[in-house]
Image (tube, rainbow, N blue to C red):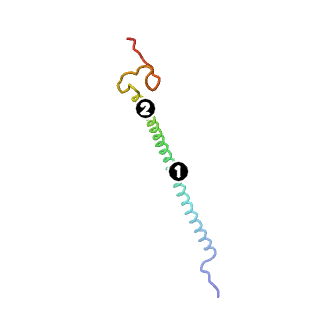
């Protein structure tokens, strides 16, 4: 029994070529879309990095300011807790927790 071919080899090759061209075109479109998506992701990443750096700098500045405020509060507390500080009168020379400089007026 013999099989009859309904198409000739030339038509088969043309169909295969057309399919290859269509597949190549579809792959090129997919590649172009993937490249565009990758470019958008890179831009988003750069934006996120800039925003993160900006926020981190703000937090660092806030932390430094908090440290300065804490140091100032500790200093005020130490000064307020010295003997004689509550009464507002100067301490006599040689009394208290540490060395003092006594300032005298020339009046």
Considering every residue shown, the one lying at the far left of the view is: 87
Q: Residue 91 versus residue 79: which sits nearer the camera? A: 91
Q: Residue 17 — which label?
A: none
List x then y, in percent, for residue 30.
54, 60
The residue pinned by badge 1 equals 42
C-alpha gap between disc 2 and disc 1:
45 Å
| Quadrant in which the C terminus is drawn | top left
Considering every residue shown, the one lying at the far bottom of the view is: 1
Describe the element under mark 1 as helix, strand or loop: helix
Nearer mark to the viewer, of 2 and 1? 2
List x then y, in percent, for residue 5.
62, 81
Q: Which of the 4 image quarters holds residue 12?
A: bottom right
List x then y, in percent, for residue 17.
61, 68
Q: Residue 24 versus residue 47: which sits nearer the camera? A: 47
Residue at image location 54% in from the left, 55% down from the top: 35
Q: Residue 37 versus residue 75: which sits nearer the camera? A: 75
| Left or right, residue 81 beside residue 45 | left
Residue at image location 53% in from the left, 54% down from the top: 38
In this picture, is 73 found above or below 8?
above
Describe the element under mark 2 as helix, strand or loop: helix
Q: Classify 10 Å Cα crowding around label 2: few (below 14), some (14-19), many (20 and above).
A: few
Q: Residue 72 — which label?
A: 2
Q: Which of the 4 image quarters holds residue 85?
A: top left
Choose the circle earlier in sequence order: 2 or 1: 1
Q: Residue 70 versus residue 48: which sits nearer the camera? A: 70
């Amino acid at each position: 029994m013999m099989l009859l071919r309904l198409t000739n080899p030339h038509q088969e090759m043309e169909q295969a070529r057309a399919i290859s061209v269509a597949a190549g075109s579809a792959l090129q479109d997919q590649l172009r879309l993937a490249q565009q998506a990758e470019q958008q992701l890179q831009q988003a990443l750069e934006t996120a990095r800039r925003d993160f750096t900006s926020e981190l700098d703000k937090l660092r500045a806030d932390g430094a300011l908090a440290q300065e405020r804490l140091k100032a509060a500790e200093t005020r507390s130490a000064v307020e807790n010295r003997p004689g500080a509550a009464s507002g009168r100067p301490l006599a020379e040689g009394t208290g927790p540490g060395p003092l400089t006594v300032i005298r007026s020339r009046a």
